Amino acid sequence: MSSLLETDRRVLALALARMADAVGNSFLIVVLPVYIAEGAVSGSAFGLTQTMVTGVVLSLFGFLNSFTQPFAGRLSDRTGKRKAFILFGLAVLVVTNVAYAFAGTYLSLIVVRALQGVGVAFTIPCTIALVNELATTDTRGGNMGVFNTFRLLGFGMGPIAAGSVVELGPYSFGGFAVNGFEAAFYVAAVGALVSYLLVTLLVNDPESTEANAGEDLSVSLRDGDGGLDPVFTLGLATLFLAVSIALLSTIEPRINERLSQGKTWFGLQFAVFVLAQVVLQTPVGSASDRYGRRPFILAGLVLLVPSTLVQGFVATSTGMLLARLVQGVAGALVFAPALALAGDLAREGQSGTQLSVLTMAFGLGTAVGPLASGFLVRFGFATPFAFGATLAAVAALLVYSQVEETVSREASDPQAAPQD
């Protein structure tokens, strides 16, 4: 609670904005696979199976979003304009969420998803860069934790509500009838619109952002000693983490059949991962300001290995729920400290470029995960989860060997002066 009260109001506004649009975005992760599976989309499927088409639709957003983020982050560093890019991305999100209701073919669905991915890429790195620039070394972990808490709260609420919105349809509003799927798309659009209004009214670019705008914007793969650059290493770890947690979406029908469960159970299993992070993100972020970033990141990646692997072998809905809960704890130990550590290392005026490495990696991981599970599940239900667990183990080894601590004992002393 104290971390929340001490947080800059602009960070809180950004966090609330991300929560609002995250509710809508998470609707789509649950709704789109069912939308396709129930025959709401017609036309050519490009010779692919329904499972693979679903994977393409879900992953396309992540791929285009991820590969566009470094350019958006670099451009915002160069111009010193964060807010304008955030608003542009949110405007695209509003329009494309509405467009889903009119996308009746596979081709139109893919086009809408692609446009949405590119548009939102202008929002994510600029938002994270603003949160980073509004913090000091002593508060960066707490700020990242608060931001992620609200973002994930919205992301966790969406799947629980999405199934109910679809199943309770159709609806009638003043004589205008919409089915459950259309209602879900409109709810997603309203969430993005609320975010747009919050950022417009409550957020401004800090003066230092424009003052530090420059041309020297680069990301290295290696450090001066010949090892991997720590920010790049954190990007790889974030990529592997994201792949591990994104394996479920594409194989939702297989999971429900295997566990003899309905959509509501799957929604709970998807959301409990996020719930664990909602509870833990802020305290973990604040603790990393005091005790260091690296121990939390390593602990989370190590815990991610068994919590991912066991999902391929559980035989009950409750067992899957518990596995996802533990996986959520693992994610909470990594997310805020990793962003804070990368923020500690970011040079002045380069937050957008440097932090886009992590945001790009996360988006890419959420794109690779559904595709990987859709392909690997043909070799056995446990195969995708064994793949995810292996990536988590590699991530832990990389962070252990390539990333050093940025929080000194002096910085963790509440009486010490801020280093930024």
Image (cartoon, rainbow, N blue to C red):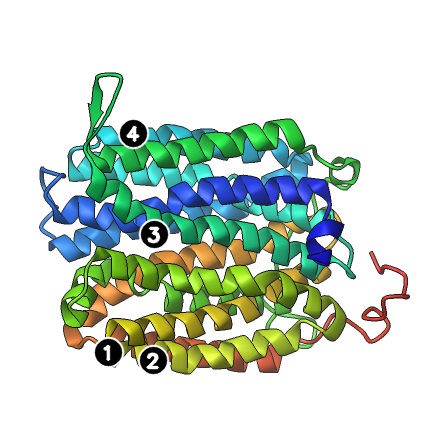
SS for callout 1: loop
Question: Mark 1 and mark 4: span between their CA atoms?
Answer: 36 Å
Quarter-wise, where is residue 246 in the image?
bottom left
SS for callout 2: helix
The crowding category of the residue bearing disc 1, from other C-alpha atoms within 10 Å (few below 14, some 14 to 19, many at least 20), is some
Q: Are marks 1 and 2 in contact (CB under 8 Å)?
A: yes
The crowding category of the residue bearing disc 3, from other C-alpha atoms within 10 Å (few below 14, some 14 to 19, many at least 20), is many
Of the numbered discs 2 and 3, the one sitting upstream in the chain is 3
Of the numbered discs 4 and 3, the one sitting upstream in the chain is 4
Q: Which mark is residue 160?
A: 3
228 w.r.t. 246: above or below: below
Question: Mark 4 and mark 3: span between their CA atoms?
Answer: 23 Å
Q: Which mark is residue 105?
A: none
Name the amino acid, label 3. Ile
Of the numbered discs 1 and 4, the one sitting upstream in the chain is 4
Q: Position of residue 209 (x, y in %)?
A: 74, 40
Name the amino acid, label 4. Ala
Residue bearing the label numbered 1: 382
Q: Which mark is residue 309?
A: 2
Question: Mark 4 and mark 2: span between their CA atoms?
Answer: 38 Å
92 w.r.t. 390: above or below: above
